[in-house]
């Protein structure tokens, strides 16, 4: 049984506190194509860990604006199926697939991935790109996804964790050992990990500056909601500071223990 509505799930995945910000996210994030995950890192890991180089089936859960799927389809000619809860993001992703000449390889749809997953088949690659524990904790998420993962398939997770000796806590971020325990309990194992690059901190500052500018524009257009946009800016500033100093961001590859 779902414990969150779709809107609540989106808010948690995107580190938002007030549901009133949801209709404005497409405007605030209009300068972003890549949201969270680095497509080049994910493509590199897939090239490394997929044994059969022929066309693979990819499920991109919480695909955002489709940067990972579109670039993967272009680079590897894989069939990519992306699902996201924000309709404007899905429309943008479809337009990008057409722009990149891979519309025949990419299918994007809007919906609640917690419901959509129940009726999906098997995929060679499943991507959880910076959407957090949207299907529950990692044990619940990976246990549910395992039935949709082909033999020798992989799951790519872009997320953050906190080291064991850190006193920092966050409602949506696990300690590293707890994350690994849940992966193991789900019958899977971590086979690779790429930490975020050293230039990430500078990138965070640039990202924050872009979204802050859009929030200021919205505040000018909707002065009655100026406090909403200011609160969002403050929350995102805190989140970016956490990413720079407390949370270790990484792209992980996991597979079933019997997947070899």
Image: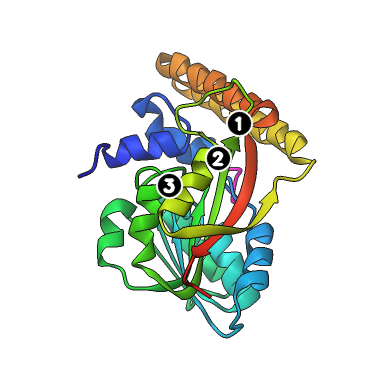
Could you say which quadrant of the image residue 197 lies in? top right
Labels 2 and 1: the sequence-earlier one: 1
The vertical placement of 76 against 69, above or below, is: below
Which structural element holds mark 2? helix
Which residue does the image show at 74% across and 34% down from the upper left? 201
Residue 220 appearing in the image: no
Q: Depth-wise, is mark 3 or mark 2 nearer the camera? A: 2
**Relative image position of residue 25 (x, y in whole percent):** 46, 36
Does the magenta portion include 32?
Answer: yes
Marks 2/1 in contact by CB < 8 Å: the verdict is yes
Q: What residue sits right under mark 2 in the picture?
A: 177
| Highlighted range, magenta | 30-34
Depth check, front residue: 189 or 95? 189
Real-space Cα separation, disc 2 to disc 1, in angstroms: 7 Å
Which residue does the image show at 69% across and 26% down from the upper left? 245
The vertical placement of 66 against 220, above or below, is: below
The mark found on residue 164 in the picture is 1
């Amino acid at each position: 049984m779902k414990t969150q509505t779709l809107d609540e799930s989106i808010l948690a995945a995107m580190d938002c506190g007030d549901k009133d910000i949801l209709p404005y996210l497409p405007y605030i994030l209009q300068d972003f194509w890549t949201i969270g995950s680095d497509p080049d890192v994910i493509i590199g890991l897939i090239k490394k860990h997929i044994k059969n180089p022929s066309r693979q089936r990819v499920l991109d859960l919480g695909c955002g604006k489709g940067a990972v799927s579109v670039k993967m389809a272009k680079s590897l000619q894989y069939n990519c199926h992306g699902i996201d809860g924000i309709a404007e993001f899905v429309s943008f992703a479809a337009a990008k697939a057409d722009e990149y000449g891979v519309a025949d390889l990419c299918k994007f749809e809007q919906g609640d991935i917690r419901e959509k997953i129940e009726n999906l088949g098997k995929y060679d690659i499943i991507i959880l790109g910076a959407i957090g524990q949207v299907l529950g904790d990692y044990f619940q998420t990976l246990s549910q996804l395992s039935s949709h993962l082909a033999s020798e398939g992989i799951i790519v997770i872009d997320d953050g964790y906190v080291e064991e000796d850190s006193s920092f806590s966050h409602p949506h971020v696990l300690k590293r050992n707890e994350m690994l325990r849940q992966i193991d309990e789900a019958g899977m194992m971590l086979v690779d990990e790429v930490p975020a690059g050293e230039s990430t901190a500078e990138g965070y500052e640039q990202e924050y500056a872009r979204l802050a500018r859009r929030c200021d524009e919205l505040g000018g257009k909707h002065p009655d909601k100026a406090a909403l946009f200011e609160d969002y800016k403050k929350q995102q500033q805190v989140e970016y500071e956490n990413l720079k100093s407390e949370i270790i961001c990484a792209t992980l590859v996991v597979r079933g223990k019997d997947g070899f």
